[in-house]
Each structure stands twice: as structure tokens, then as C-alpha cells.
Image (cartoon, helix red, strand yellow):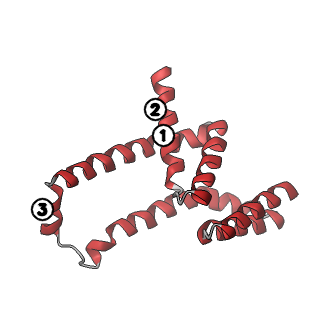
Amino acid sequence: MIQVVSTFLAIALLSFITKDRILMFAAILLAVLAAIDSKPVITLLQKNAFPIGIFFLMLFILLPIANQKTSLANMAGQLVSIEGALAIIAGLGISFIGGKGVGVLANHPTVLMGVIVGTLIAVLFFEGLPAGLIIAAGLIGIFHQATA
């Protein structure tokens, strides 16, 4: 338990130094839960954090429509541009790859640890986003399928 708490506190400290408050608070929360040995809460978070995170991500994506910052007619016009078409292709491709990554993360601990470390490095030092974790796992999943 001390090793787990220490790991989370080290992540929190690095997050503080690099000014990534979200990662810092997540690491502190998990350090506290590990320190008090709250396995039921950790299990509950493990089951539900991903779908809740996806919900808030989708909410964020749809907010410009709710704020009426863009109209449906304006959006439709933008989608037929070259930039709009490339955005559709990029969104489709990355979402497809990310979808492949969810199963990989659950079934391959080695991949999970590798993408966690890579994601933490990107988030802490290169202004990355943790969405890269799922996309990286998806790329590994596609690689596994291609070589199987």
C-alpha cells in the first residue's frame, strides 16, 4: 500500500509542478483511497469512471450547439468544406481506433502499463491529453489483430 500511495503522491507532485490540476486531484484522490484501503470505492470508480468520463466528453463536444454558438445550417455548410471533410475522416478514424483500445486495456496488463506511462509523460511534460491512452491501446489492438 505504501508503494501505491507513494506512486500517486509522486504523480500528484509532478502534476503540481507541471500545473496539471486535473491529474493532480485525481492522483491525490486515489492516494487517499489507497491509504485508507477503500477497495469498494476504488472498484466502484474502476467500473464507472470510464463511462462517466465519456459522458462528460460527449457533453463537452455538444455544448457549442446548446450554447447556440453555431447553427445546424452553419455546421452543415462547414462540413462540406475540405477542412470539414478532413475533420470527419479524422474523427471517424480516431474514434474507431479508440473503440478498439477499450478491450485491449482490460485484457492486456502489459499494454495498460505501457500506455499509462506514455500518457502520463505526454500529459505531464508535453501538454498531452489522457485520451491518448485509449487511442494508443487501440493502435496496439489493431496491430495484434493484424499479426494474429
Position above or below: 131 against 72: above
Position above or below: 30 against 120: below
Q: Secondary structure at mark 2?
A: helix
Q: Which residue is mark 2?
A: 142
Q: Secondary structure at mark 3?
A: helix
Residue reaching furthest to the right:
2
**Badge 2 density bin: few <14, some 14–19, many ≥20, Cα 10 Å:** some
Residue 96, image x, y percentages:
38, 43
Q: Residue at x 47, y 26 (%)?
A: 145
The disc labelled 1 sits on which kind of residue?
A: Gly
The disc labelled 2 sits on which kind of residue?
A: Ile
Q: Which mark is residue 77?
A: 3
Of the two numbered discs 3 and 2 on the same chain, state the one appearing first in sequence.
3
Please indicate, yes or no, whether residue 121 appears anywhere in the rendered image: yes
Judged by depth in the image, the label closer to the viewer, 1 or 3, is 3
Position above or below: 69 against 94: below
Instruction: State which quadrant residue 36 falls in.
Output: bottom right
**Foreground residue among 103 and 112:** 112
Q: Residue at x 43, y 64 (%)?
A: 57
Q: Is the Cβ of the residue at disc 3 closer than 8 Å to that at disc 2?
A: no
Q: Is the Cβ of the residue at disc 2 closer than 8 Å to that at disc 1?
A: yes
Q: CA distance from mark 2 to mark 1?
A: 6 Å
Q: Which residue is mark 1?
A: 138
Q: Residue at x 62, y 36 (%)?
A: 108
